[in-house]
Image (spheres, helix red, strand yellow):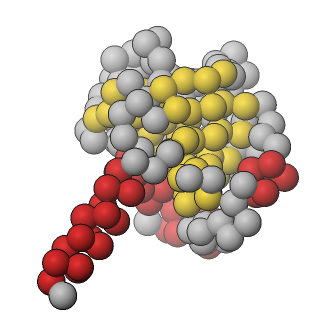
Amino acid sequence: MKFYKVTFIFLLCVSYSFAYKEIIIDLGMQKIYAIEDGEVVIESRISTGKPGHRTPVGKFTITEKKRHHISNIYHLPMPFMMRLTNWGIAIHQGYVPDYPASHGCIRVPREYAEQLFHWAPMGTPVQVKQSAQYTDLYKRAPEAKKIKQKTLAEDNYAKAKNRRVTIDDFL
């Protein structure tokens, strides 16, 4: 009986390690989707590049990951950083208002940034699109295991109540 349990656990781990993973970023809706074997496993709101500092559209790959990273350009912390380009575009934890507000990076709320960081290995493909085809996305994932988000009002209230304004809010 122990042999079957060990075999089952081994096969479960192997299948997890070979799962196809990708990240889709929708600039129009300011959303990020982590997709594993055709199912949306993480979905969150984001904040991307503001006018003059637009987030580039295209296909990228996660080339570097750092839990604690300091921006080379702005000298500010970028927790849970996953680099997409050599010229400074990355997915990282940051302030996420309801509009594009960064200097080109993709900012994600802390709880989702940490989940994405641990979920996505190096080499994970990332597609940044002006608008994703939601019908196609959800057809691929009819029983999507989405992580529930707090309502915007609860989230904004919690941030305002327990948070100091920092320079990162404006970058």
Identify the residue at image location x=74%, y=50%. Answer: 137
**Nearer-the-camera pick, 128 or 6:** 6
Instruction: Examine the image and state in which quarter residue 157 appears.
Output: bottom right
**Nearer-the-camera pick, 72 or 145:** 145
Q: Is residue 85 above or below residue 140?
A: above
Identify the residue at image location x=24%, y=70%. Answer: 7
Q: Position of residue 65 (x, y in %)?
A: 32, 33
Judge whether residue 169 can be spotted in this image. Answer: no
Identify the residue at image location x=29%, y=73%. Answer: 8
Q: Is residue 153 above or below residue 88?
A: below
Q: Quadrant of the N terminus?
A: bottom left
In the image: residue 1, left or right of residue 131: left
Residue farthest toward the bottom in the current orientation of the protein: 1
**Nearer-the-camera pick, 97 or 145:** 145
Q: Position of residue 100 (x, y in %)?
A: 68, 36
Instruction: Examine the image and state in which quarter residue 27 appears.
Output: top right
Q: Position of residue 108 (x, y in %)?
A: 52, 47
Judge whether residue 92 can be spotted in this image. Answer: yes
**Nearer-the-camera pick, 165 or 144:** 144
